[in-house]
Image (cartoon, rainbow, N blue to C red):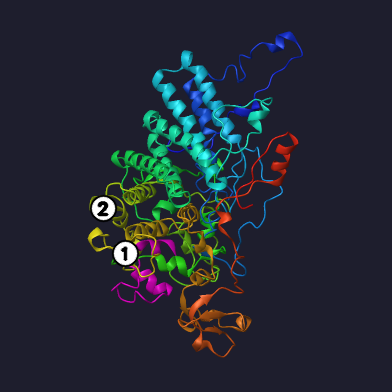
Amino acid sequence: MKRYLPILIFAVALGFTGCEDVDFLDRPSLTTMNDENYWTSENNLRLFANGFYSNYFVGYNSAWGTDYAPLRGYYFSDDFTSTGKQGGFETQAPESRASTSETASWLTTYAGPTWDFAWVRKSNLFLERIEKMKASYLSESAYQHWSAVARFFRGYEYSRLVSVFGDVPYYDRVIGDSELDQLYKDRDSRTVVMDHVYDDFAYVLDNMRTSDGNVQYLNKYIAAGFISRFMLFEGTWQKYHLNNQEKAKKYLELAVRAANIVMASGNYSFASDFRSLFGSQDLAGNKEVIMYRHYDAALSITHHIASYSNLTESQTPAPNLSLAKSFICNDGKPYKLSSVANADKLDIKNMVASRDPRFEATFWDAPKKESATLLYACKFIDRVGVTYYGQTYPAAYGSNTNTNDAPVMRLAEVVLNWIEAKAELATMGGPAVTQSDIDQSINAIRNRPLDATAKAKGIVKTAALSLADLPDDPDRDPDVPALLWEIRRERRMEFVFEHTRLMDIKRWKKINYMNGTTHPDNLLGLWINFQQEYPEWLVTSKVNKLKVKKADGTIVTYNGSNAADMVGYYIPENITDRDAFTDRVYLAPVGNTQISEYLDKGYTLTQTPGW
């Protein structure tokens, strides 16, 4: 078996039932699984654990699903722009926010779960059943491994809940229906919760197996990759939001430790070109991929993410000028400092030629009307899929029948988590980052192989980053050291339309980047000469609609006779900035109904600050 599939065999955690009508019906069944006879083997534990996979290792989701999926789910950040008014943050607390569903669901503008503790309960139930099995069915090493698996999922869920709501009630056991003081307890502080998560994750790193018989089953390396993600998030949140350096160091040090486990294993390397990480029909054997989700049309396990990268389907929101400008030039310098030919020309053609190879691998190399900004992301489809533009797409590239594999955890994220955590620790008295650290992380990524298509276009690898010659980007925020600025840039280039950008600017306390009034590049596309690059839009239907912004800020509107003057940054049609927002949007409010339900029982549920 080379893949994991979302196995939901054990209707299991919620589906045990019994009968009381006749005495002989109360005898334990010899042929049907129930809570009394299920917990008897490691294989049954493995099957139960697989029930968590579709919630936590979503990949490209399935069919038309978008939750936690790149491109179609992660589109709310300063990287992306739509026509018309920009999508906004919440403006008031919702009527209700609670759920008890185990279906993967989330809040788009927070990139995390709703107010739902079903998965916390499920992981606690898992732990309790493992504990009961210890004496009769599990060796000590098996007990340690499966306890680590259950604690990993509990820590994962609490990390996501805290990232959305901040303070949440913490439960380390299954709560009975009559335990009202526990069921209706108020929120625990995020630091209390995350200290429990820290303990769970430390246990995972000490006790989970390095292999559970298949590289796609949860193991120490997969878990460590996610632990590096969550501990980096919380460590930087503690630093920038709570000014708690003690906790920041604690969590960041665990992020470094977790990433080190992956990096020191020798199992993974940057042996793949960038595009193949996302468009491949089979990621088995890809040395950069720590875990992936495999899709198989024969098993009716498919998705639709490739079809929205196929040049035909529309993209809105779409990549904006702010994102494009962040890409480093191939000499390793930001464009304002670069000596690469035409580095200061911000049209698509020149940016493809002069930027880091990830630019060419991420975006189509000409304006596309299917994109709200004319810059089209084709990152999540292979090089063959886009050649069907204007034709009938095979099932692999159209509709919701796509079968390219999804990287769930990859080495690039681990090493970027690692180097950022080390750099943050260095600002708080920790060891200085060394050139060797940079070589193992940023420079290893930049040294990825190039595929044949990129080479044919003349794309070259980006020069290595040198600590002795760090770029001093004139656009750098003055409160961010130069090294951290370059690490943050590397993340932005690496993870376009993936899970990171909104979470990154939230943890860095930079949500103001979402303000298009103070960051006008958010509301623009790249530089374009319509007469030369896209004359098909110089038509009557675009009169008084098509607009460009000159370098001096002048806006030119197409009037039907000024085609030669339609040169500048593309302005998406009818664009306006999102509504004003405040720092309260870093965290989500709970529902008014949930607060009322607590009051009805004589308890208090505290609302999120600011709401």
Secondary-structure class at tag 2: helix
- Quadrant that contains the N terminus: top left
Q: Residue 99: image x %, image y %?
A: 66, 40
Tag 1: residue type? Answer: Lys
Q: Mark 1 points at which residue?
A: 455
- Mark 1 is surrounded, within 10 Å at the Cα level, by few (under 14), some (14 to 19) or many (20 or more) other residues, namely few
Q: Can you tell which of label 1 and label 2 is closer to the viewer?
A: 2
Q: In which image quadrant can residue 201 be found?
A: top left
From the top left corner, tell me how far across and down residue 332 is, in percent: 30, 65
Asked whether, in this view, residue 540 is left or right of residue 569, the answer is right
For the question of whether residue 5 can be seen, the reply is: no
Q: Is 458 drawn above or below residue 427 in the view shown?
A: below
Query: Tag 1's secondary structure?
Result: helix
Q: Which of 591 and 340 is in front in this view?
A: 591
Examine the rendering and report whether any part of residue 202 can be seen. Answer: yes
Which range of residues does the magenta coloring cover? 334-363
Q: Residue furthest right?
A: 21
Question: Which mark, residue 439?
Answer: 2
Name the disc covering residue 608, or none: none
- Per the model, the C-alpha gap separating discs 1 and 2 is 23 Å
Where residue 194 appears, as percent x and y from the top left, is 48, 39
Q: Which amino acid, by three-letter code, is at mark 2?
A: Asp
Q: Position of residue 554 (x, y in %)?
A: 51, 84
Q: How many labels does the image show?
A: 2
Residue found at x 66% / y 33%: 184
Q: Which of 112 and 318 is in front in this view?
A: 112
Q: Nearer the viewer, residue 284 or 106?
A: 106
Task: Identify whether 542 is placed above or below 402.
Answer: below
Q: Which quadrant holds residue 167?
A: top right
Q: Earlier in the sequence, mark 1 or mark 2?
A: 2
